[in-house]
Amino acid sequence: MGDRMEDSFCGDFLVLERMLTFNQAKNWNIIDGRQNSLSALQNRYGLVYSFYAVGFHWSLEHFFDDVLGLLADDGIGVFLIPEQFEPFPTLDTVSWHRIPMDTVEESERRLGMLVLSKSRDVISQL
């Protein structure tokens, strides 16, 4: 990973909003975790996604209850994880699948995605 600069995509919600609009995504809501406590949100979502945040820089284990509280019963959580990710005991209370990924640049760092759902049927379709 390189240095974070003024025009970095990381945390640029305006760029994210433009991308969602350009791709004609419907019924989305960007939630800035710096401004809103996850546990205070009342809605349930079909997709909870974290890229280089929860699951990568901050352990999903510490946010697991918050994430589950946000997921609809048939919702999916997707988290970018490092290669050395270790499953934790409460992860087995949901259905989950680890998907290995190779980075674009050859490096020592390998990434993966952790996909989880409260519904076993959702994950079995992957």
Image (cartoon, grey):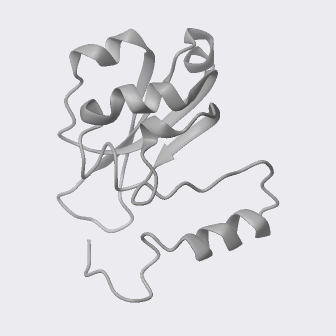
Of the 4 image quadrants, the one containing the N terminus is: bottom left
Q: Position of residue 83 (x, y in %)?
A: 23, 43
Above or below 104: residue 70: above
Figure quadrant of residue 84: top left
Left of 66 or right of it: where is 19?
right
Q: Position of residue 32 (x, y in %)?
A: 48, 59
Q: Is residue 126 visible?
A: no
Q: Position of residue 44 (x, y in %)?
A: 62, 30
The residue most toward the front is 40
Left of 78 or right of it: where is 53?
left
Figure quadrant of residue 52: bottom left
Q: Is residue 84 visible?
A: yes
Please state the total of marks drawn on the protein image: 0
The residue most toward the bottom is 6
Left of 3 or right of it: where is 70?
right
Residue at horizontal 22 percent and vertical 21 percent from the top? 88
Residue at horizontal 42 percent and vertical 71 percent from the top? 10
Residue at horizontal 43 percent and vertical 14 percent from the top? 94
Q: Identify which residue, 83 or 57, lies in the foreground.
A: 57
Left of 50 or right of it: where is 75?
right
Of the 4 image quadrants, the one containing the C terminus is: top right
Q: Position of residue 45 (x, y in %)?
A: 63, 34
Residue at horizontal 17 percent and vertical 58 percent from the top? 108
Q: Identify which residue, 5 or 82, lies in the foreground.
A: 5
Above or below 70: residue 59: below
Above or below 110: residue 126: above
